[in-house]
Image (tube, helix red, strand yellow):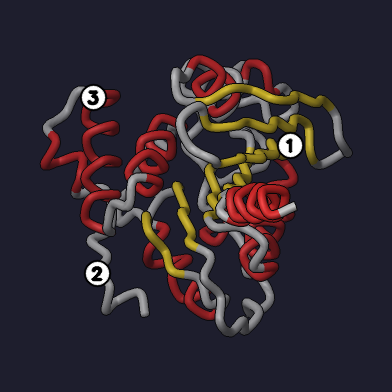
Amino acid sequence: MKWFFIFLFVVGTAHAEQKSVRVFVALCDNKTQGIIPVGEKIGNGDDPDANLYWGCSDGFGSYFKRSSKWDVVKSEKDISHSVMRRMELKHKEDDIVLLVDAYRGSEIRNCYIAFEDALASKEHDLVAFIGHNVLMDTTLLDAKVVEKNQTKSVVLSCRSESYCRGRLETLGSTPVLLTQQLMYPGAFILHDAIESWRNGGDLAAIRNAAGKAYAKNQGISVSAATNVFAKLTEDSTE
């Protein structure tokens, strides 16, 4: 009986330590988003498999499937009119589960709202948004005021610090990666940022990981690439 209770304690502790990552991807859409148009196929927000932010080599769906760090547990299509793809992944080296939804390009507003709702729920350890900065094109209702929120946040879109940071802080979230320039939100950035975060990296380490990943992809210096991301500090995120 003694060993049985020890077993339950160990299993319960392991389960309690599991981390949850939630990701929202707004598919690139030439027709409905205020972006510089990209190629017709990769900018079709109704076709996730060819989309710049999902099906292309740097898109979330393709990049994370190829990753040596993650296993795909489940993939679903056409969850709703808004959610065109859903994928559940499990980290190979750590007890982390990741659930990602890819939203139709014309549903980017609802995608961002879902991102904020996930932050407000306090059900996840890290919540991320990837896509065009919808706040450049529209206004939203004031963010919910949430107290005692330990959820970390990432927004990979152009100039997300100036547009999103105030809303994230109102939600009680601590942003760990934001941008201060126009940029390309490839999934490789989030991939490497998560690796730094899961290994206990501080804000500077997460920023550096993102910068190195961006430099490699864009063929620019690490210094220039790192400057794409806002220099967050512990004091500035409290």
Q: Characterize the local packing of mark 1: few (<14), some (14-19) or many (20 or more) Cα atoms within 10 angstroms.
A: many
Residue under numbered circle 1: 104
Cα–Cα span, label 2 and label 1 = 34 Å
Question: Residue 113: image x %, image y %?
Answer: 69, 61
Q: Earlier in the sequence, mark 3 or mark 1?
A: 1
Dot 3 amino acid type: Lys
Residue under numbered circle 2: 233
| Proximity of marks 2 and 1: CB atoms separated by less than 8 Å | no
Residue under numbered circle 3: 216
- State the image quarter where residue 12 is shown: bottom right
Q: Nearer the viewer, mark 3 or mark 2?
A: 2
Q: Characterize the local packing of mark 3: few (<14), some (14-19) or many (20 or more) Cα atoms within 10 angstroms.
A: few
Residue sitting nearer the eye, 208 or 109:
208
Cα–Cα span, label 3 and label 1 = 29 Å
Q: Residue furthest front?
A: 1
In the displayed structure image, the side of residue 125 where residue 115 appears, left or right: right
Q: Characterize the local packing of mark 2: few (<14), some (14-19) or many (20 or more) Cα atoms within 10 angstroms.
A: few
Dot 2 amino acid type: Thr
Q: What mark, if any, has residue 163 been given in the picture?
A: none
